[in-house]
Amino acid sequence: MDALSVVCQLRDLASEPQNRAVIVQDQGCLPGLVLFLDHQNPEVLFATLQTLRYLAELPINVPIMKIELGMMVSLENLIRREGLSLDITALAKEVYSILRAPANPAPRTPEREKRRKPQFFINSTNNKAKSVTLHIQGLDSTQQRGLCEEALLKVKGVISFTFQMASKRCTVRIRSDLPTESLATAIASTKVLSAQQVVKNEAGEEVYVPLNSCGAQVPQNADIPDYLPEEEESPEREVDKAISRTAAKEDSNGSWLNAAASFLTKTFYW
């Protein structure tokens, strides 16, 4: 195991709601994630922040995460660190804001709860999928975010998505055969939002690429599940390589989570 593989596996594990309490309650995983916030590899930083964002989605995790030694200080340092991408800084601010929020926020309605489930990455290892980063003009509030979520959920081929509200961005994971223009068309159908693709030029600088939102076909989902699977034809992971959804509920002994916690403990606490 190395830092990147461990944190990516933890991120994928945390994307399953039933695993989030187990991860936070483990004595090794949460302290290890805090230490990863000081890592120099941007990929490790972004995956760590995604993992923390998943974990913070469970309300009972928030007070535990907030008082974890070094958590808030590391997030503050990360927000102030220079030379990081906008995505990393924005996600760090989002996690920090969630942990700083009042202890008893207004309860979510069932409609809002159902709407928020698909916003995270389900799995990042499917080679038949691709990730697209969009800059969405008009993404200024939770109301506009809700409109964008509803539009994306209707597009057949969208696997998952996550928002960076501070930078008005949405990273969408889609099937490789779905044209990016279909996303722009779906977002433009809201009448208040429009999307441009964020790419890097030859100099490594981020630029916005206009997308044709007129005339592009948008394949529609007939029935929208709570979340969309990555790939129905993909073989299932072997139990000894990654925790399964059933194992996460029934028996965590010998699971990948224990292996990850052991790695973090040996790495940072020997």
Image: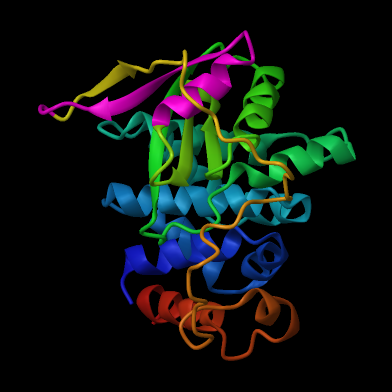
Q: Is residue 103 above or below residue 252?
A: above
Coordinates of residue 263 in the picture (x, y in percent): 41, 79
Q: Nearer the viewer, residue 244 or 232?
A: 232
> Is residue 145 left or right of 264 when viewed as pictured?
right
Q: Nearer the viewer, residue 232 or 98?
A: 232
Q: Is residue 183 magenta?
A: yes
Q: Nearer the viewer, residue 53 or 76?
A: 53
- Residue located 65% across and 49% down the image: 56
Give the residues drawn in magenta, as a range.
180-203
Q: Position of residue 259 (x, y in %)?
A: 48, 83
| Residue 99 in which image quadrant | top right
Horizontal relation, residue 268 to residue 209: left or right: right
Instruction: Give the quadrant of residue 268.
Output: bottom left
The quadrant of the rendering that contains the N terminus is: bottom left
Does residue 269 appear anywhere in the picture? no
Magenta-colored stretch includes residue 31: no
Q: Residue at x 39, y 15 (%)?
A: 212
Q: Indicate left or right for 266 with 103 as reference.
A: left
Q: 74 or 134: which is nearer to us? A: 134
Q: Residue at x 54, y 39 (%)?
A: 162
| Image: 48 above or below 179 | below
